[in-house]
Amino acid sequence: MDESILQQFRRDGFWIARQACPPERVDAMREVAEAALVRRRRPFELESEVGYPGAPRENAPGSDTIRRLLDALALDPVFLDWACDPMLVARLRALLEAESIRVVRAHHNCVMTKLPAFSSATGWHQDLRYWAFERPELINAWTALGVEAEGNGGMRVIPGSHRAAFEPESFDDQRFFRTDAAPNRAWLDRAVQIDLEQGDVLLFHAGLLHAAGANRTDRRKLSVVFSYRAADNLPRPGSRSAARADLDPDPVTAALIDRPADPDA
């Protein structure tokens, strides 16, 4: 990887690998995801369960809207193959500055979806505030399975926020970055919209502040998200981050994944 890319990532906390995922692989992942949504293939998370702004309430119209298809590594081999793709893994090794890395199974490892009618907005947050590892050094790989922009709930990020030492009062009781706190305003004013084309991969530090709005278009938005860590950056014992053994992407076989029974098979 070019040294300038590494320097940019260290400074800003993100980098976009344009057209990194080949069209045929994007199409295959989207086809599987669309079918899983139609079949309501478990496990999944509902918009109403999360309760973010704009989400339907329990038992209200749209309360059964799926927000995330969970455990993508076990959903279909096409996701496993992409998470462990040699070119993608090489980029993650370079950005993590680690020879040996792991795909995290307890966090992300999902297909994110935003439906037009019942999608919600996600406030500013850092993923690391919900995770527990020895070092705050993890990277997310967000693969766009279609166009992502402000109108359909595309992501916004605050460059450089992964390097900040925020005070606890910068966050509310749900650990979202407060938009009503005066000291936070300078950071919020630095926010940028991330526009992605199909096949683009947004690689971002798990400490980077990011947010996303609702989908106001008439087409579903789909993204595949995996998180990575250095092999020696272990989850803290007893934490949610340690709930599942992480995956060594090199070498890897489908036999390493515990696949749940398909109730529709």
Image (cartoon, grey):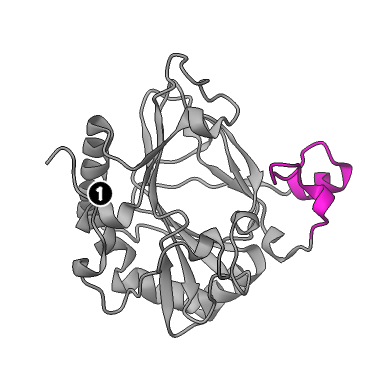
Q: In x, y percent, where is residue 237?
A: 56, 70
Q: Nearer the viewer, residue 105 or 156?
A: 105
Q: Amino acid at mark 1?
A: Met
Q: Quadrant of residue 250?
A: bottom left
Which residue is outermost to the left? 265
Q: Which residues are magenta?
A: 166-188
**Residue 190 is one of the magenta-drawn residues:** no
- Left or right? Give the position of 61 relative to 131: left
* Residue occupying the far top of the picture: 61
Q: Is residue 169 magenta?
A: yes
Instruction: Find residue 7 and report its horizontal and vertical position in percent.
Output: 60, 75
Q: Position of 170 compared to 230: left or right?
A: right
Q: Residue visible at 38% across and 23% down?
A: 218
Q: Is residue 204 visible from the viewing direction of this image? A: no
Residue at image position (61%, 54%) is 130
Q: Which quarter of the picture shows residue 90?
A: bottom left
- How many numbered callouts? 1
Q: Residue furthest front?
A: 238
Identified at 51% across, 74% down, the residue is 95
Please identify the quarter of the rendering in which residue 79 is found.
Answer: bottom left
Can you say which quadrant of the picture contains the N terminus? bottom left
Question: Extreme bottom residue here?
Answer: 99
Q: Judging from the image, what secondary structure is the residue with disc 1 in?
A: helix
